[in-house]
Image (tube, rainbow, N blue to C red):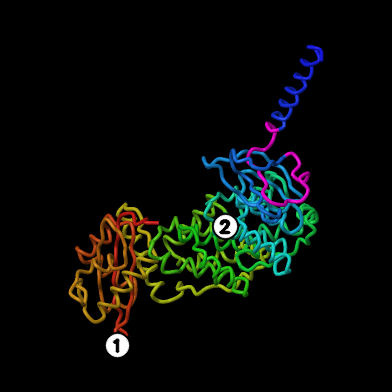
Amino acid sequence: MKRGDFTGLYAKLVAGLLAAIGIMCVMTPNVYAEGEIGNAAQLSEKESFEGYDGGSGISFDGDIDDLSYVPDEDGESDDDEGSVDGYEVYDDAKEAFATTGTGGFVARMYRIVLGREPEQGGYDYWVAKLNNKELGAADIVTEFFGSEEYKNKHKSNAAVVRDFYAAMLERTPDADGLSYWVRRLNVGMTEQAIAAGFVGSTEFAGICGRYGMDPGTVTLKYARDQNYERTYFVYRLYNNCLGRQPETDGLEHWCAKIAAGESGAEIAQGFVFSTEFKRFHTENEDFVKMLYRTILAREAEGQGYTYWVDLLDYTTTRERVFNGFLFSEEFAGQCQVAGINVGNAIYEPDDTDTWRMNIDVLTLCNRERQAAGLSRLKTKEWLWEEVAMVRADEITGYFSHTRPDGRSCWTAYTDAGINYGYSAENIAAGYQDAYAVVNGWMNSSGHRSNILGTSEYLATGLAYDGGRRKHYSQNFMYGSNNWW
């Protein structure tokens, strides 16, 4: 053998050894096989070789259906991806799961909605539900989005909408679509409303078609998901009247009442004249702004705002102003869109002798103040109802500025939760009408000084004793009470 021939043979041996090493270098280091796995060609680029233990990742032990995940010692995993006979293989995955059929659909929901690979138990559970026809494709979507795991991500409403677009439409939302669905989530509608809106889309039908599934349907379980305009109406009442976000049960309660046929007037009355709202003791100005925002869904305009505030300050109860808003063309139009019956006017105390006395006394006292060059006093219905009427009733049996329980008359204000900077009280009994009682007070220096004093607000209560003798309590107040 010539020297040159030996060298050539040596070179071939080295080349062969290097080639073998090269093959090993491109093998996926975290995959090994033990036992029978069928045709090794099924592993594609993820080659296997017996005895490799230089790391761990995807482990085959027995059949391919037993594919399982073995983490590296350092807890890390490679980013290699591939597929094995209809199964996706992720080195950072806990399992390898089907990419087609119901299994593929379920795995897709895990990755898009929950942002992770499935756990085997959960994966098998949902696949079985689909295969047994217990759930449809749309049901799986709503189950995943409604899961505690998803809710605990505390995503923004915009992020939730983007996830729905990815899961059901396989795209990012356009600006109008994003805004449309975010508005619905903002007022308290649930993710089911989005699913119901997307389930009939051609995009979702196409996704389901790839997995050999029917899109199915979404049955809305909650009244708050059935009609945006209705839910928005209730949301406005919570937000603008009570000054807070609705609690879930409360929102559902009121939306269910509307769905059952309760009128807009009844729903709004339940908020505007609730104990919760009344305790705020809102200024008349704030009351009018609230009605614009809740009933008309807009801000007050100058002329209309001034008109309603003046009525409240000098002549009219909140119930009558409330009815004025309810039976406006604007609210009727909103109710028509939402399928809500406007309903009937609520009771107004305006024509009662007690409210008329309050306004008559206010008018007469303001004449005296204007003659003295002073600004007019205003009235507040809650000052009349919660202090003046209470005190008028008390003095029918105990005519004194001391209350029947021995406390000062000023505790009538604090008992009602009214915050004031200054208060005063005039009382009288036996006078037949407003003219007579105001004349009697004006002819008494102490009472006169209260009428012509520095107060801003006045309310006069009227009550009758057993013999129908009239008793009057005139209660003044100065200072802001706007806790709302």
Mark closest to the chain's N terminus, 2 or 1: 2
Residue 186 placement, left or right of 9: left
85 is higher (above) or lower (below) than 339: above
- The residue that disc 1 covers is 467
Residue 86 placement, left or right of 406: right
- The number of numbered badges drawn on the structure is 2
Q: Confirm whether the magenta stretch covers residue 43.
A: yes
The structure residue drawn at horizontal position 37% and vertical position 72%, both measured from the top left corner, is 357
Q: Quadrant of the N terminus?
A: top right
Q: Sort mark 1 into few (<14), some (14-19) or many (20+) by Cα contacts within 10 Å.
A: few
160 is higher (above) or lower (below) than 226: above
Q: Confirm whether the magenta stretch covers residue 21.
A: no
Image x and y of residue 10, in percent: 75, 19
Image x and y of residue 212, in percent: 80, 58
The structure residue drawn at horizontal position 52% and vertical position 49%, both measured from the top left corner, is 302
- The residue that disc 2 covers is 187
The structure residue drawn at horizontal position 67% and vertical position 51%, both measured from the top left corner, is 96
Residue 179 in view here: no
Q: Secondary structure at mark 1?
A: loop
